[in-house]
Amino acid sequence: MSLKANNDAIERIETFVIQIPRDTPYLGPLRAGEAVNRAGYVVRRGNRTIYPVTDRSLLLRITTRDGITGWGETYGIVAPGAVRELIADVVAPILEGHDPTAPAAIHDELYDLMRVRGYFGGFWLDALAAVDIALWDILGKRLGVPVSTLLGGRRHDTIPAYVSGLPAATLPERCDLARHWIAQGFPAVKFAAVVADDGAEAEIAALRRALGEGPRIMADLHWKNTAPEAIRLIRRMEPHGLTFAEAPCAPEDIEGVALVARSVGVPVALGEELRTAHEWLPRFERRCMGIAQPEMGRTGITEFARIGSLCDAFHVAVAPHATIGVGVFLAASLQVASTLSRTTWHEYQHSVFDRGRAFVTGDMDCRAGHWTVPTGAGLGVEPTEAVLAHALP
Ligand code: MG
């Protein structure tokens, strides 16, 4: 690689698999026919997707020879050992001893290492996301500025938050939960169609009756529908005041979701599963969405910022995804989102963030309907001993 060594070079890269117990599984209590297997996973029947019953994340720490510590984080919810091994076996031996102060160049050089083998995404890009976030953190700390300053400066100090997920067993309980969040000052709630017992149309109708006319309601359709099914479903939901329809079709069905986007009266939102600008580009070109939902834990900062530039070029709003993590990639997401002209919302996973308020330092917050973008140098947050105590051996 062309990276040069110096006295501020990377000394050490370490990973930590964090596992945190949960009272209620992600997406709510287990349904009939759903059981926890011997590895601690449950397959949700509604979307045939595997989830752990604990919260898990993969933290990464890069230490430089002159003592700066940068933190990164990526998805660890399923098979976190895969990313851990990629870092230990491929990435760390290359980066140790090298200059950390060119995160985007390092990201691209690491990306190149595996492209001829077809590793354009998946666990490999998850590993690169964690490294990239930590390198931007180091650069910000070295210069004494937030990552947002490195990216051209902030347009937003706060970002509107929508409440994501209503993890309760019955529809009346989910309506109560929605009312609770709106009463806390949040302008919008998103429900998961995959656990809507009587279907997404009945779910939004009940939520609208419970909330009245004002609050926004979004629906996550969890990639379940063919294009014609999605068009029929979304059209039936529109009279109930749907703000956006997320993930209507399978991720591979680019033409299908483009047809949906052309055929319904509300924006399609998508993209949490996509990692690089290369993966995103065909969705922009085919006008698949009105709202992009990049997930920092999969993209890293460099690719997230590139996706943000595509949003500008294609006049697409940005509403970053938020998921299970300890707060490091979330802070990175807020840092980049704060610099983008088209940031409209940022997802708020209350069951993750509120439980983890003690897991990171800094002034990142979400209350009364807004995220506060952290103001400290680098990411503006660091993991606390409280979260590192949950590291698996
Ligand atoms: Mg989603």
Image (cartoon, grey):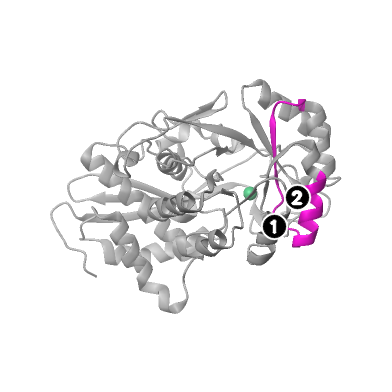
Quadrant of the rendered structure where residue 5 is? bottom left
Task: Name the residue type under label 2.
Answer: Val
Q: Is residue 192 above or below residue 223?
A: above
Task: Evaluate whether residue 232 shows in this view.
Answer: yes
Residue lying at the far left in this picture: please name it.
7
Disc 1 C-beta below 8 A from ligand 1:
no
Q: Is residue 371 left or right of residue 305?
A: right
Over which residues does the magenta segment extend?
A: 211-236
| 1 and 2 marks in contact (CB < 8 Å) | no
| Label 1 vs label 2, nearer the camera | 1
| Mark 1 neighbour class, 10 Å CA radius: few under 14, some 14 to 19, many 20 or more | some
Q: Which mark is residue 194?
A: 2
What element does badge 1 sit on?
loop
Quadrant of the rendered structure where residue 263 is? bottom right
* Rendered location of residue 185, percent (x, y): 61, 22
Quote the CA–CA distance across marks 1 and 2: 10 Å
Q: Is residue 286 above or below residue 165?
A: below
* Rendered location of residue 288, percent (x, y): 61, 57
